[in-house]
Amino acid sequence: MQQRHTDIAIIGAGSAGLSAWHAAKKHTDDVVLVEAGEYGTTCARVGCMPSKLLIAAADAAHRARQADVFGVNVGAVEVDGSAVMARVKRERDRFVAGVLDSMKRIPASHRIRGHARFIQPHTLQVDDHTQLTANAIIIATGSRPSWPGMLEPAGDRLIVNDDVFERDTLPESVAVFGPGVIGLELGQALSRLGVRTRMFGVGGSIGPLQSEKVRQTADEVFNHEFYLDADADVKHIERQGEGVAITFIERDSGRELTETFDYVLAATGRQANIDRLDIESAELSLDEHGVPHFNRFTLQCVNADDSESHIFITGDANQAVPLLHEAVSEGKIAARNAANLDDVQVGRRNVPLSVIFTEPQIAIVGDNRPSLEARYGGCDCIAEGGVSFDDQGRATVMGENHGYMALFAEHGSGAFLGAELLGPRVEHMAHLLAWALEQKLTVSEMLAMPFYHPVLEEGLRTGLSDLNAALKQGPAITERCMECGPGD
Ligand SMILES: Cc1cc2nc3c(=O)[nH]c(=O)nc-3n(C[C@H](O)[C@H](O)[C@H](O)COP(=O)(O)OP(=O)(O)OC[C@H]3O[C@@H](n4cnc5c(N)ncnc54)[C@H](O)[C@@H]3O)c2cc1C
């Protein structure tokens, strides 16, 4: 057994771990990165990149099928599943190769291969070959798909996102469980690629949407394209022959149907890779899921006796905001603090921004309405405006006039607070809004910005005007809202 000591040990060479490694190196030469699985990151191997590659193929098929709207006849659209998957894998492998190249720049002496688990608060056991003691430890172990027991009867036909990208061709049919971010993206893409798809959810949620108007619009728009029952009544799931038989109540007819699918795709959430860390030996304060309590701005964990720990937790492992840019940002903050345990500082966090690459796209900027209401603690401080994309000029020109955006601002100050967007290519508009939020702009300041013609952002201007009209402004309200609102 090798005994080794280091300043900072990082568990997990994913996006958060790699970001932490590079940031930590600016403070100390003594950093060790431990990785149990394949190098290459979840994002490049089975996450952001292969999913967007599949979506790009799906969108190409969809565009071709929609071409007749413009009087362009491209004939029957044929999807070659093997060619689609070949490109997905080829480009995916190029992205992974890029990560592997950057791994090579990390000297072998700074890397250990193997599964790390705690045996003491400062000591990790890596497989059965190394005991690594560290002054500070950064947990960057990511997450993995999880599914409810009700899907287990699908047996070997139960798949997750990782499996989709490993296939050599497309299946004939898939039942997608979970219309969350991953389910919506993959489900719509598979459907556009000609895979018979039904999507089932529980409780009515669609993606991260909290605004009822936006959620309802999403329900209608997606249902035009594929079957989505966000509040499904699934009676029975059974492995049968070459597939899985699912008995469910059809949403509009109320009939009980039994249909067979090649696969059940579980997109029902992800669980933090904390459970295999023997985290109890780290003597941390844990929540009910066994995830350490931590400070979101320093990433520092809390000891069981409530004191500050030398352990930090980043990326999907802490389950706070499971997004790539947040993992990278958290890795940097944790590394800076792990290297300066006597001077742990709050790191700068960007405003919340997330994009779901469906069509229409979904984007969330800032806090959603329930979070804002919780933040303002019952004060009637939030103005809401909105606009439909149904008649928006540029969206109509492109034949993509579907969606709705809900925008929020603070009465009194007129400060822009956030938005839920469902609309064509809103990934770009979401960035404008996030930047406005970072700059703490008011709605009237945003309306004073230039808007070209004819662009989708003119829809945003209409939404902002609606929001502006809903704003109550004046000194009395300003005082009240500045008192209970977040201020700066
Ligand atoms: C299908 C899909 C699509 C996505 N699309 C997007 C998107 O469009 N945009 C976006 O922002 N985000 C997206 N995400 C989320 C994004 O991929 C993650 O937030 C990000 O990859 C998390 O990085 P991480 O470093 O926390 O975890 P990972 O990259 O998973 O790294 C964790 C590493 O830790 C290792 N590890 C685990 N346990 C141990 C242990 N005990 N010892 C040693 N090593 C260990 C693992 O092997 C792994 O290499 C998507 C995710 C999925 C699944």
Image (cartoon, grey):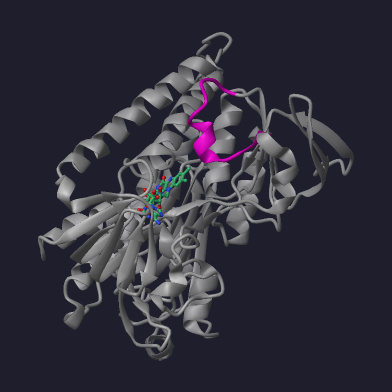
Where is residue 237? Give x, y as percent: 79, 41
Q: Say which quarter of the image contains residue 414.
A: bottom left
* Residue 332 seen by the camera: no
Q: How many marks?
A: 0
In the image, residue 370 sits, relative to residue 431, either above or below, namely below
In magenta stretch: residue 161: yes
In the image, residue 303 sits, relative to residue 366, either above or below, namely below
Where is residue 41? Give x, y as percent: 35, 44
In the image, residue 380 sits, relative to residue 438, either above or below, namely below
Say which residue appears at 63% left-offset and 60% top-offset. Answer: 212
Of residues 245 and 349, which is closer to you in this image?
A: 245
In the image, residue 366 sits, relative to residue 249, either above or below, namely below
Q: Say which quarter of the image contains residue 96.
A: top left
Say which residue appears at 41% left-offset and 80% top-offset. Answer: 473
Of residues 132 and 19, which is closer to you in this image?
A: 132
Where is residue 303? Give x, y as percent: 38, 82
Of residues 312 and 262, which is closer to you in this image?
A: 312
- In the image: residue 151, left or right of residue 469: right
* Residue 279 seen by the camera: yes
- In the image: residue 180, left or right of residue 97: right
Say which residue appears at 53% left-offset and 34% top-offset. Answer: 163
Q: Which residues are magenta?
A: 157-170
- In this view, the residue farthest toward the right is 255
Of residues 207 and 481, which is closer to you in this image?
A: 207
Where is residue 285? Give x, y as percent: 45, 80
Pick the quarter of the image with the C terminus.
bottom left
